[in-house]
Amino acid sequence: MTTILNWKQKPLSHTSEIYHGNKVVGSIKENSMNQHANGLINGKKFIFRTSGFIKSNTLIVDGETDKIVGNITYNSWMTKARIKTPEGIAHWKYDNPFNTKWSLKDDNDLNITYSRSNGIIKTDHQNDLLLLTGLYISQYYRRITFLMLFVVFVPILVTIINLIINNS
């Protein structure tokens, strides 16, 4: 049976919330200062601890026991990721060129699909850790993309402003 959830992230917010009907069942709150995020879903707490920038890796930690329950490795093109948990390996990927739809699948028939445009998550199996992880990866890639654009465009913008000021 397919479960349909909704998720929302307010503009300029570091928190996404997951809803089942009108009830909040989960959330992810990013801390951009230390590349960590705190997740909560159906009463289970998870911490996503990311290290590295060029070759990033994220450890997923059980928020209650402080034990590592998963590991995320990202590809260089920021279009795919691999999640390793004690249950096996799952694969995350964008499903369209606009990066507004993505999915997470594993070898045990898990299939979770996400849509940014209408904020819908569809899942055939209940796996809270992977459901939350699929949303986290999208937010991680979005944050890295924003950071790269900032690094590229700020010097260009500063140069243009200096040219305008010097020519006035």
Image (cartoon, rainbow, N blue to C red):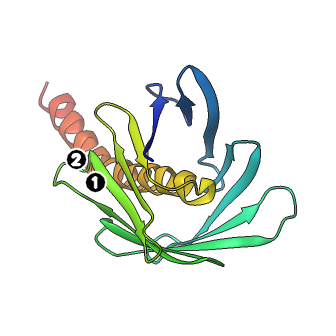
Task: Give residue 64's position: percent from left, percent from top.
Answer: 86, 56
Query: Would you name the residue on which mark 1 appears?
Result: 152
161 left or right of 7 in image: left
For the point 87% across and 63% down, the residue is: 65
Task: Give residue 131's position: percent from left, percent from top.
Answer: 53, 53
Front residue (pair 39, 129):
129
Classify residue 34 by image quadrant: bottom right
For the point 60% across and 74% down, the residue is: 71
Kindly indicate whether the residue at mark 1 contacts the one at mark 2 (C-beta within 8 angstroms). Answer: yes
Q: How far is disc 2 from disc 1 in space, using C-alphas?
A: 7 Å
92 is higher (above) or lower (below) than 89: above
Task: Give residue 89's position: percent from left, percent from top.
Answer: 50, 79
Classify residue 133 by image quadrant: bottom right
For the point 28% across and 41% down, the residue is: 158
65 is higher (above) or lower (below) than 85: above
Mark 1, Cα crowd under 10 Å, few <14 / some 14-19 / many 20+, is few
Query: Would you name the residue on which mark 2 appears?
Result: 156
> What amino acid is found at the position of numbered circle 2 in the picture?
Ile
SS for dot 2: helix
SS for dot 1: helix
27 left or right of 118 in image: right
75 is higher (above) or lower (below) than 10: below
